[in-house]
Image: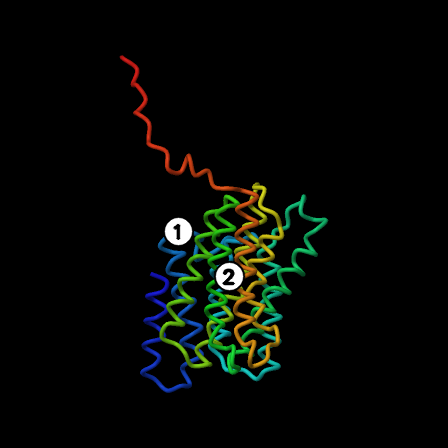
Amino acid sequence: MPAALAAAVVAAARLRPEAMDRAAGAIGVAVGWLAAVAMLDLAPLVPPAARSWQWLPMLVAGAAVMGSLKLRPWMNVVAGVLGASLTAGILVPDWENLAPSRGRLQLLLVAGAAAIWAMQFLADRLLGRWIPAALAVAGLAAAIVLERSGTARFAQMAGALAAALVGAAALGTRSQVISGCVPAAAIILPGALVSGWLNSHSAVPLGSYLLAGSAPLALFVPAGRGWRFFPPAMVVVLATAAIALAMWAEPIDWAAAFAEPGPPAAQPVP
């Protein structure tokens, strides 16, 4: 459903002037993801007053609005830093046991979200067409890492992002559509990973989360004309490493997964 909704929004925008391209990408990804969140009851669309992951839908909606605007480059940078800072301030809870590392975790979240937000500036370049695919691969890797960490809610959020990006990219190949897809992803991907890490009690190491979140940033690696496939390949390598590390830490019990269901328990005789 996220892919279908995102594709529908982008397809509708193709009937309008190109000035609507950026809004189509931003709204398409956000609408697809928010619809999945509502249908699967992953988070309330109206969050509580306390700072927590439950604010993620509202933050994504705000990112979609900002992503719809065609701003000057310096204004876009400022918007990205402000959006990342707001996300870090809201999503990282003020738990007492988190106090010693809360500032460092917030800085990490700000850096990750702002770096992904800056991927918009690659949209007009040769690698721009790879942006939705790179973010979708990272979203899929994050979904598997989060599933292995025992946080299915956030795994579904990351998977819904991957699906929405695929849907938007399927019909939106113009650079402004691609650029518009980025802001919502810049909030969802690191936001889901950080929230999942905070709420996990598994053995999945922090490195697995970091690899999944940083995978799309490999598109920033400069590559000559003969090496133009190197950055996308690095995205896949980093995403695969994130999955492998999570699988190593929390392997799947294949015997239990494919075991025949046993007979029903005997009912006590009244």
Please tell me which residue is depicted at 58% across the width and 65% down the height of the picture.
113
* Marker disc for residue 163: none
Looking at the image, the residue that sits furthest to the top is 270
Give the percent coordinates (x, y) of residue 203: 59, 42
Q: Is residue 188 left or right of residue 6?
A: right
Query: In this view, which residue lies farthest toward the left?
Result: 270
Estimate the spatial distance between the alpha carbons at disc 1 and disc 2, rounded to whole Å.
23 Å
Which one is nearer the viewer's eye here, 237 or 210?
A: 237
**Residue 154 x, y percent position in the rendering:** 48, 52
Query: Is 194 situated above or below 8?
Result: above
Identify the residue position indicated by label 2 in the image.
138
Q: Nearer the viewer, residue 40 or 255?
A: 255
Residue drawn at x 48%, y 55% is: 47
Residue pointed to by mark 1: 41
Q: Secondary structure at mark 1?
A: loop
Which quarter of the figure is the N terminus placed in? bottom left
Q: Is residue 77 above or below residue 142?
A: below
Q: Residues within 10 Å of mark 1 (few under 14, many from 20)?
A: few
Q: Quadrant of the C terminus?
A: top left
Viewed as shown, does residue 96 lie left or right of 56?
right
Tell me which corner region of the image, top left, top right, bottom left or bottom right, holds residue 31: bottom left
In the rendered structure, which amino acid carries the disc numbered 1?
Answer: Asp
Badge nearest the viewer, 1 or 2: 2
| Mark 2 crowdedness (10 Å alpha carbons): few <14, some 14-19, many ≥20 | many
Specify which label sits upstream in the sequence, 1 or 2.
Answer: 1
Give the camera-side residue of 226 and 15. Answer: 226
**Mark 2 is on which residue type?**
Ala
Residue with the most extreme right position: 100
Residue 196's spot in the image, x, y percent? 54, 50
Determine whether the residue tagged by mark 2 lies in a helix, strand or loop.
helix
